[in-house]
Amino acid sequence: MHNNAAVEHRAFLTTEEVLGYLNTTPRTIYRLIRSGELPAVRIGRQWRFRRADLDAWVERQRLGPATTIGNSVTF
């Protein structure tokens, strides 16, 4: 397993690093990639993830779905 401090300083993460970072399973990661929900880039046969994209995705999950009422957005 990779050290989380080292992972924090890298722009792109491997699938293995994302598994540790998000504390989830490979099946969940690949399901989220296939659905287009989790942003990832395929390089050859491997997936890479930008840390900034993962952090933004986690924040969206934390906030939950937004709904629009008139001109305002509520969560």
Image: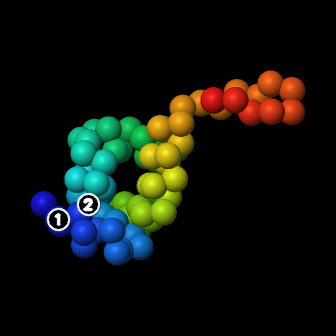
Query: On residue 2, which mark appears?
Result: 1
Query: On residue 17, which mark appears?
Result: 2
Q: Secondary structure at mark 2?
A: helix
Residue 7 visible somewhere in the drawing: yes
Tell whether 25 sits left or right of 10.
Answer: left
Viewer-side residue, 27 vs 17: 17
Viewer-side residue, 61 vs 18: 61
Residue 71, placed above or below residue 19: above
Q: Position of residue 50 (x, y in %)?
A: 45, 65
Q: Position of residue 34 (x, y in %)?
A: 45, 42
Residue at 30%, 48% in the rendered image: 22
Q: What's the residue type where badge 1 is placed? A: His
Q: Residues within 10 Å of mark 1 (few under 14, many from 20)?
A: few
Q: Secondary structure at mark 1?
A: loop
- Location of the C terminus by quadrant is top right
> Is label 1 in contact with label 2 (beta carbons under 8 Å)?
yes
Residue at 32%, 38% in the rendered image: 28
Q: Position of residue 7 (x, y in %)?
A: 28, 68
Disc 1 to disc 2, C-alpha distance: 7 Å
Residue 58, placed above or below residue 14: above
Tell whether 57 sits left or right of 4.
Answer: right
Residue 64, placed above or below residue 19: above
